[in-house]
Amino acid sequence: MNTEYNTESLMAELESMRKSCLPPLFIGIGILILGVVSFAINLILAIILIIVGIVFIGIKYSPVKKAYCNAYKQKLVMGVFANNFDNVRYNPADGYSEGFISHTGFISMGNIFHSEDLITGEYKGVSFSRADLRIEDETTTTDSDGNTQTHTTTYFNGRWIILTHNKNFDYDLQVVQKGFGYANTKSGFFTRKDEKRHKVEFENEAFNKKFQTFCQDEQEAFYLITPPIMEELFEYSDAADGKVMLGFKDNEVHVAVHNNKDSLEPSLFRSVNYKHDLQPIEAEVNAIRDFVDKLKIDREIYK
């Protein structure tokens, strides 16, 4: 783990880089606006201004924005993870595959899939990964007059964390916060018998009121969803800026937060600060650590 990490100076550096992105952006937009306005005066002048504006943004703005985004991810995000975990690797352009997420059977799959910001590492010998994930379903309808209309439904947009357990679970188990939306609970009438889950409730009425649990085996459900895990789900769902789902499949623990956000993307139009930038990253780091600790995934007895 990296212990040499000065958050205050890094955030000041990132704030300076963010500010340097704004002048070329505003100048480029200003030139484009002049070009649009000039259409009413001189067509050739308008076209020239629009071309100049596009070229200016490409040459002056795009490189500084890219440098800022790269520094934000590789220094701030990577720094927080590397300071808390071992063997951390970060590939902003990479993510989970569609087939991999589909195989979990925890979420409805549409016809549009995108994943990025993949981070992998280890905590107490337990491997983990996290990535941003967006799943959408796009449908096109045509009316009797031949007019087409496209409708997009977002099934999931948020972050997805996976902890690799050191033993295989015997059955699938899923805990879904009410309001999560398009979770695939596999509890329907037409679900295959070997995949079907059924609803189970615990003695904790507050937990049952906030979460729904679907399992293939009640004994394993009571074994895994212990009071410390219930407590962690309460705390994480309160701290998370969205709805939470917890899933157990094969040797993996899945923790998903649906919040309609790209969690590791910096904003150009507000200052880099603890609340909006560092705190969400630390919350994700703490969630990984807490779930490993409270599920006791690192225990030698399971290896």
Image (cartoon, rainbow, N blue to C red):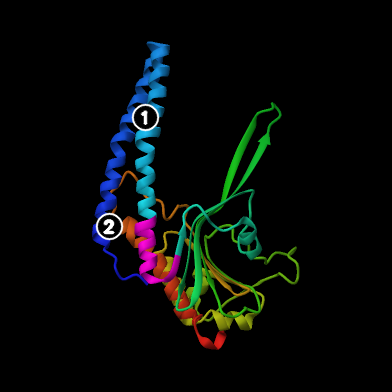
**Type of the residue with mark 1:** Phe
> Is residue 183 visible in this depiction of the protein?
yes
Is the stretch drawn in magenta largely helix, strand or loop? helix
Q: Position of residue 281 (x, y in %)?
A: 38, 62
Front residue of 58/35: it is 58
Query: In which quadrant is the N terminus drawn?
Result: bottom left
**Type of the residue with mark 2:** Leu
Residue occupying image coordinates x 46% and y 63%: 89
Residue wearing tag 2: 10
Residue occupying image coordinates x 31% and y 33%: 26
Front residue of 208/153: it is 153
Can you say whether 38 is above or below 184 in the image? Answer: above
Q: Say which quarter of the image contains residue 198.
A: bottom right
Q: Secondary structure at mark 1?
A: helix
Highlighted range, magenta? 74-88
Q: Position of residue 303 (x, y in %)?
A: 56, 84
The numbered disc on residue 56 is 1
Query: Is residue 81 covered in magenta?
Result: yes
- In whole angstroms, how far apart are the C-alphas of marks 1 and 2? 29 Å
Can you say whether 261 is above or below 282 in the image? Answer: above
